[in-house]
Image: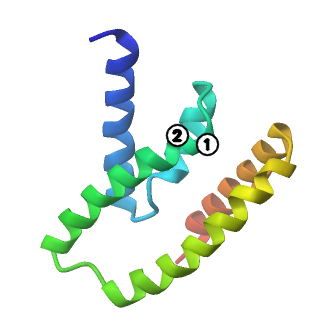
Amino acid sequence: MNSTSILMILAGLVVGVGASFSGLGGGFLMVPLLLLLGYAVGTSFLAILVISISALVAHNKLANVDYRIGILLGVGGVVGAQVGARLVEHVSTASFKRIFAGILVGLAAYLFFQK
């Protein structure tokens, strides 16, 4: 196993803990990490899928899953993902990074000032 593989496994471990612990999903950590390492955004979705399924199984055992709400959000998410994947083709990488950074800063501010 090479050093890149070990780094990816360790990064996945950190993202998995952060995603499952916070409930925010793996994207808020995985996307910036993969962009930093030079991988495409699409790669993060596969990693997030695997992490999310694992977190779902663990939280289901703790009875922390509302399947009705999850399915409703998922239906909207499927439509939004199709639209977003087509829209991102028209946004430069630099603009995408700024937009994503703005979302992360907004989320951080919300969490920081939340009572």
In which quadrant of the rendered view does residue 69 lie?
A: bottom left
The residue carrying mark 2 is 43
| Image coords of residue 85 (percent x, y) | 69, 56
The residue carrying mark 1 is 41
Residue at the (15%, 74%) spot, across then down: 62
In the figure, is residue 60 to the left or right of 41? left
Residue at the (33%, 9%) spot, across then down: 2
Tell which residue pokes out farthest to the top in this image.
2
Compared to 62, does 88 lie above or below? Answer: above
Tell which residue pokes out farthest to the bottom in this image.
68
**Secondary structure under badge 2?**
helix
In the figure, is residue 24 to the left or right of 109? left
Compared to 9, does 69 lie above or below? Answer: below
Q: Amino acid at mark 1?
A: Val
| Image coords of residue 25 (percent x, y) | 44, 59
In the figure, is residue 91 to the left or right of 83? right
Q: Amino acid at mark 2?
A: Thr
